[in-house]
Amino acid sequence: MNIKLLEKFWNWLRTDYPRDSYTEIKLMNIEDDRLYKQVQCFQEEHDIVIRKNCQFFIKEFKDLWQILNYKAGIFDKYSKICYSISPKFFDEKGDISGKYDHMKIADMIFLDIEKIEHSSLTEEDEPFIKQFINNVMDRLRQYGLTKPVVVHSGGGYHLLYKVKRMKFDKGRKLGYKQFISELEFLNSKLYKIDHCVDLSRCIGLPETFNNKRGKKVTIIGPIPKEPIDDYYIKSKRMDLIKKLEKQLKGRKIDTGSNEYFAGYVDGWNDREAKVKHSESDWEELMSEEDRKLR
């Protein structure tokens, strides 16, 4: 486990979080019920908020490291360790959970990209799903969303865009769902943007083991220093998406070749309709600084 890289990711995740906010660390896909007893033992030994024998609510990296390092990494060995992409807060009654009721703000645009049938990626899939992801990232640049943290989840890829903190309410929740649904026209016959747009969601923690897929969760890169300040996820940009969707109607997005259709709308893209991406594009995602951490 690369502690320095994980700590860098943690600090990025909690950038600008309020002091009274917590990050949820959740044990999922638990392989042995005896692990719940180990959580109870951990709670007796550490001053950390725990709910339902599988949810930890923490603020500091040292607390995360205590969880990961407990009894030679027993939680990582027998469960999938996940983290919340949005901060959680205690309510007026003095309780906390991973639900929307305990969210006040949001600052993450999150996309989960995977195979249509949810199966694990094979070595043969990698060059094609990377082309698909490059296509998605090209689209998101039109919203001002650039330089995501790219994480290989073990089953697919996560694109994480840290944005300026915004108050979370029902309108924001519905607007985010609409934004993700508007991107679904990019889906191909092989790969897709997962329809799950739950901002209270927990996803696989980098540098831990995805026991469901049998693979390590790995940061591809890079980790930006600052949140994205200037971006759009509605209004005029939505209109352009709809126009592009009409243009694409009846056209096949070819994910089985070395090229993909990169659709064109006036004012959107100064490239030709077909754009090639090479492995070097992905190698450049990882900054020199992050490569040294590896």
Image (cartoon, grey):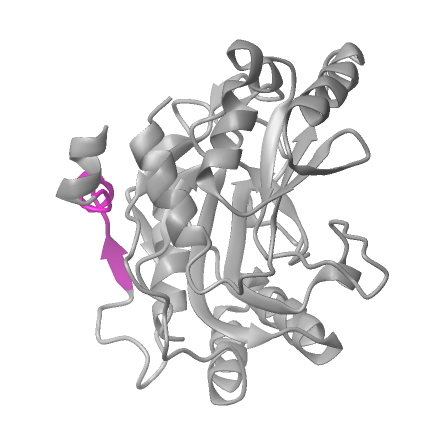
In the foreground, 96 or 160: 96
Q: Position of residue 290 (x, y in %)?
A: 22, 39
The location of residue 128, given as percent across then percent down, is 38, 38
- Residue 73 horizontal/vertical position (percent): 53, 15
Up-down relation of residue 260 to residue 181 (above or below): above
129 versus 263 height, above or below: above
User: In which quadrant of the rendered image does the C terminus lie?
Assistant: top left
- Name the side, left or right, on which 261 lies relative to 58: left
| Residue 157 magenta-highlighted | no
Report the residue that reaches farthest toward the bottom. 236
The residue lying at 62 percent from left, 25 percent from top is: 80
Q: Is residue 249 above or below residue 151?
A: below
Quadrant for the N terminus in the image: top left
**Residue 234 visible:** yes
- Judged from this view, the residue extending furthest toward the right is 93
Q: Is residue 72 left or right of residue 207?
A: right
Q: In the image, residue 268 lies at what x, y percent?
A: 32, 79
Is residue 277 one of those drawn in magenta? yes
Q: Is residue 112 left or right of residue 13?
A: right
Q: Which residue corresponds to the image point at 44% horizontal and 65% vertical from the top-left?
A: 16
The residue segment tinted magenta is 274-286
